[in-house]
Image: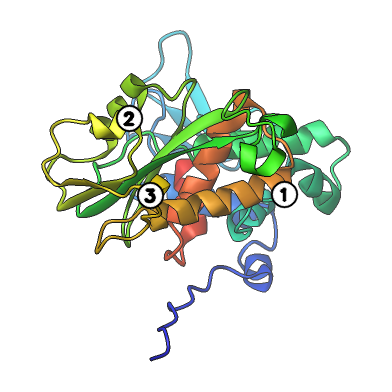
Amino acid sequence: MARKQPKQIIQMTVGQFERMFPNEEACDRYLVGNRWPKGVHCPRCGSARVYPLKTMPFKWECPDCREGGAYRFSHLVGTIFENTNVDLRQWFKVIHLMLTSKKGISARQVHRYMGFGSYKTAWYMCHRIRAALQDKEFHKLMGIVEVDETYIGGKGYNKHGRRSGTGGGHKGKTPIVGAVERQGNIVARALTVASQFTLQEFVREAVSNKVSLLATDTHPAYATLEGYPTHKMVKHSAGEYVVGAVHTNTIEGFWSIFKRGVVGTFHKVSCKYMALYVAEFQFRYNHRHNPEIFQAAMRCC
């Protein structure tokens, strides 16, 4: 029996982008509509009694914030687009490029594609967007959940012994832990150290103890995890990878996408910014079935 292929989700194409955002004013109106769908209100005090300034488009004044003078604001205040010299339409293009690239797009490629005068401009924009895409609020995962950790980076001589012949383990690498709900969302975090405490703390933070199944490998941190009566493990060292419904193939599939993005697109990611790249891949994964992923990203920005 042939395996059923998942339905392809069509995201916004380049042609659709050009028609939707033909100029800067169209971008301004789109941002206002997404930021204040129920009407413009003051970003400082929340007042809805603001009024537009007739001589200055996309600027408002709040009559309830008159301490120290009238408070004027634009639609860019409090967003990642504030205090930048880059046009809003160019910001939108970069966001669109990042969302439609499954394995990401490097700042160097954005620099070449957009024709910015400086590579630092592209680097700055990409990192600002990644920071906005971080999921600061999430619901604990339910159903069947898989948890696993992986390691990114390090020197070539620190690869596993079967690959390099020297065996360096995880020395110099950045640990990342993730939990994924099958057919659902993922929560991933970059860690300073993958200790028993940090791994168990992550599981308790991200996974409900009422899950129908919690699947992990036999890492010591998971083996001593308490409070999850449905916890089952697969022993990879003994050649076990799938035991009924117990496996970690879904989370390992996400690691595969992430690692190919790091190796093939970014080539090198520092520990300092690893969390931002994890946030970018997590956002794309969690909105993989969302044809309105661009709108979802704009609401984060």
Q: Is residue 221 above or below residue 101?
A: above
Front residue (pair 297, 43): 297
Q: Residue at x 39, y 19 (%)?
A: 65
Number of residues whose C-alpha sits closer than 10 Å to that of mark 1, classed few (under 14), some (14–19) or many (20 or more): some
Q: Amino acid at mark 2?
A: Pro
Left or right position of 76 against 43: right
Visible residue check, residue 33: no
Q: Dot 2 corresponds to which residue?
A: 220
Could you tell which of marks 1 and 3 lies nearer the N-terminus? 3
Q: Amino acid at mark 1?
A: Thr
Q: Position of residue 39 (x, y in %)?
A: 36, 46
Q: Position of residue 102 (x, y in %)?
A: 60, 58
Q: Residue at x 46, y 67 (%)?
A: 291
Q: Is residue 123 above or below residue 143?
A: above
Whether the residues at callouts 1 and 3 have beta carbons within 8 Å, the answer is no
Number of residues whose C-alpha sits closer than 10 Å to that of mark 3, classed few (under 14), some (14–19) or many (20 or more): few
Q: Nearer the viewer, mark 2 or mark 1?
A: 2
Report, in whole angstroms, how far the alpha carbon at label 3 lies from the one at label 2. Answer: 15 Å
Q: In the rendered image, which quarter is residue 172 located in?
A: top right
Total number of numbered discs in the rendering: 3
Q: Residue at x 50, y 40 (%)?
A: 279
Visible residue check, residue 272: yes
Whether the residues at callouts 2 and 1 have beta carbons within 8 Å, the answer is no
Report, in whole angstroms, how far the alpha carbon at label 1 lies from the one at label 3. Answer: 34 Å
Q: Dot 1 corresponds to which residue?
A: 265
Secondary structure beneath dot 3 equals helix
Q: Nearer the viewer, mark 3 or mark 2?
A: 3
Q: Nearer the viewer, mark 1 or mark 3?
A: 3
Q: Is residue 171 above or below residue 250?
A: above
Could you tell which of marks 3 and 2 lies nearer the N-terminus? 2
Q: Dot 3 corresponds to which residue?
A: 238
